Image: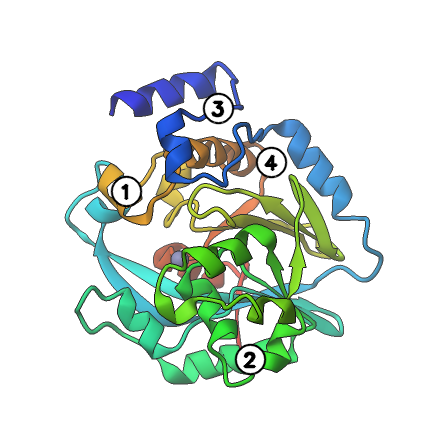
C-alpha cells in the first residue's frame, strides 16, 4: 500500500515519468527506463491517426470466446472475494470495405492453461467466428504476446495465411522466442520471419484512424491501440494494463502477488493507468480493457460495441 500512495502522490504532482528501480528493471528488462505518458502524447497520437490516408473505421465488433473465473481480490488491490468474470475476447475494427483485428482468441488447449486445473467455459463456435474474422481481415494486431491474445494466429489451422498479415513488434517476438508464457505459443527463430515485424519507440500509425501506443509493463511487448471512428468517437484498447475499468478509475494495480506471478513491471503499469485515467476522465475517450465482462456488456448495450458475426 505504501508504494501505491507514493505513486498516487507522484501523479498529483504531475510527474508522469517514473524511473524504474533496478529490482523492477530486472523483473522486466525490456522496459526502457523512462516511458513518458502525458497530454502531449495524446495530441501526437491524434495527429498521427490522420497520417494514413483512407476512410475512417465505422464501427467495432467483439466476441467472447471463453471465461476465466477469478475473484476481485485476485484482479485488483483491496478487491473483495466476490467472483469476477474475466472475458476472453477479440475485437474487429470495421472499415467501409476492410477490417482490422485486435487480438486473436485461442484454442481450448491454451484456454485450459488459464484454468489452473479447473474446467472453465469455452465456446469453440465463437473461436471459429474469430478465426473466420482473422481470415477476412486486412491486418491483425495483438495487444501483447500472452496466449489468450495471440494463440489464435500462432496455433491456427490457417497459420501461414494469417502470418502474412499479422503485425508483431520486435519485443513481442523476442518474448515468444526466449520466454513464452507457455510452451504451446513459443516461436522457433525460423518461424518469426513469416510475420510482419516492426519496432517503434512510442507510437505508430497502422491504418486510417488507428495508432499503436507502446506500453511495456504487463509484458515487454505490450501495446495499446488508439482508434478514431468516422463519428469521431475515440477508443483506446488497453489490453491487459488493467483487467477491469476499476483498475483505471482508481488508478489501482493488480495485487502484488498477481503481478509477481506474471512478472510484470508495476511502476510502468501505474504510469500507464494514470495516463489512461486522464484520457477517460478529461478527454472522453472510451477505454476498452480486454477482459472486463460487465463493462463490455455495458458498451454493447450502449451501442459502442457490436457483436462479431
Ligand atoms: Zn489477457
The residue wearing badge 4 is 283
Residue at left offset 38%, top offset 55%: 292
In the picture of the structure, the residue carrying the numbered disc 3 is: 18
- Tell me how far mark 2 sits from mark 1, CA to CA: 32 Å
Q: Is residue 88 above or below residue 52?
A: below
Residue 298, can we see it? no
- Res. 260 mark: 1
Question: Is 168 displayed left or right of 188 in the figure?
Answer: right
**Spatial CA span between label 4 and label 1:** 32 Å
Quadrant observed for ligand 1 in the rendered image: bottom left
Query: Circle 1 sits in a helix, a strand or a loop, which is it?
Result: helix
Query: Regarding mark 3 in the picture, which secondary structure is present there?
Result: loop
Q: Is residue 194 left or right of residue 19?
A: right
Q: Are marks 2 and 1 in contact (CB under 8 Å)?
A: no
Q: Which residue is mark 2?
A: 159
Q: Earlier in the sequence, mark 4 or mark 2?
A: 2
The residue mark sitting in front, 3 or 2, is: 2
From what the image shows, is residue 189 above or below residue 227?
A: below
Amino acid at each position: 500500500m505504501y508504494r501505491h500512495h507514493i505513486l498516487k502522490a507522484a501523479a498529483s504532482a504531475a510527474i508522469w515519468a517514473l524511473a524504474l528501480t533496478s529490482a523492477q528493471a530486472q523483473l522486466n528488462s525490456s522496459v526502457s527506463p523512462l516511458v513518458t505518458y502525458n497530454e502531449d502524447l495524446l495530441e501526437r497520437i491524434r495527429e498521427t491517426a490522420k497520417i494514413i490516408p483512407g476512410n475512417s473505421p465505422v464501427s467495432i465488433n467483439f466476441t467472447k470466446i471463453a471465461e476465466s473465473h477469478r475473484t476481485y481480490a485476485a484482479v485488483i488491490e483491496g478487491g473483495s472475494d466476490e467472483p469476477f468474470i474475466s472475458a476472453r475476447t477479440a475485437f474487429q475494427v470495421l472499415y467501409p470495405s476492410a477490417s482490422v483485428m485486435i487480438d486473436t482468441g485461442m484454442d481450448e488447449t491454451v484456454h485450459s492453461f488459464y484454468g489452473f486445473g479447473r474446467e472453465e467455459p469455452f465456446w469453440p463456435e465463437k473461436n471459429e467466428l474469430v478465426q473466420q474474422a482473422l481470415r477476412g481481415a486486412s491486418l491483425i494486431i495483438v495487444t501483447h504476446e500472452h496466449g489468450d491474445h495471440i494463440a489464435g494466429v500462432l496455433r491456427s489451422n490457417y497459420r501461414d495465411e494469417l502470418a502474412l498479415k499479422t503485425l508483431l513488434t520486435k519485443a513481442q517476438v523476442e518474448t515468444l522466442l526466449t520466454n513464452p508464457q507457455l510452451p504451446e505459443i513459443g516461436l522457433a527463430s525460423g518461424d518469426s520471419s513469416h510475420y510482419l515485424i516492426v519496432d517503434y519507440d512510442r507510437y505508430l500509425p497502422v491504418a486510417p484512424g488507428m495508432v499503436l501506443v507502446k506500453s511495456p509493463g504487463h509484458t515487454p511487448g505490450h501495446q495499446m491501440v488508439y482508434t478514431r471512428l468516422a463519428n469521431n468517437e475515440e477508443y483506446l484498447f488497453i489490453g491487459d494494463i488493467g483487467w477491469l475499468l476499476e483498475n483505471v478509475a482508481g488508478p489501482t494495480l493488480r495485487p502484488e502477488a498477481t503481478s509477481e506471478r506474471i512478472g510484470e513491471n508495476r511502476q510502468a503499469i501505474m504510469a500507464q493507468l494514470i495516463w489512461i485515467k486522464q484520457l477517460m476522465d478529461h478527454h472522453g475517450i472510451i477505454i476498452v480493457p480486454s477482459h472486463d465482462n460487465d463493462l463490455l456488456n455495458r458498451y454493447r448495450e450502449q451501442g459502442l460495441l457490436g457483436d462479431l458475426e
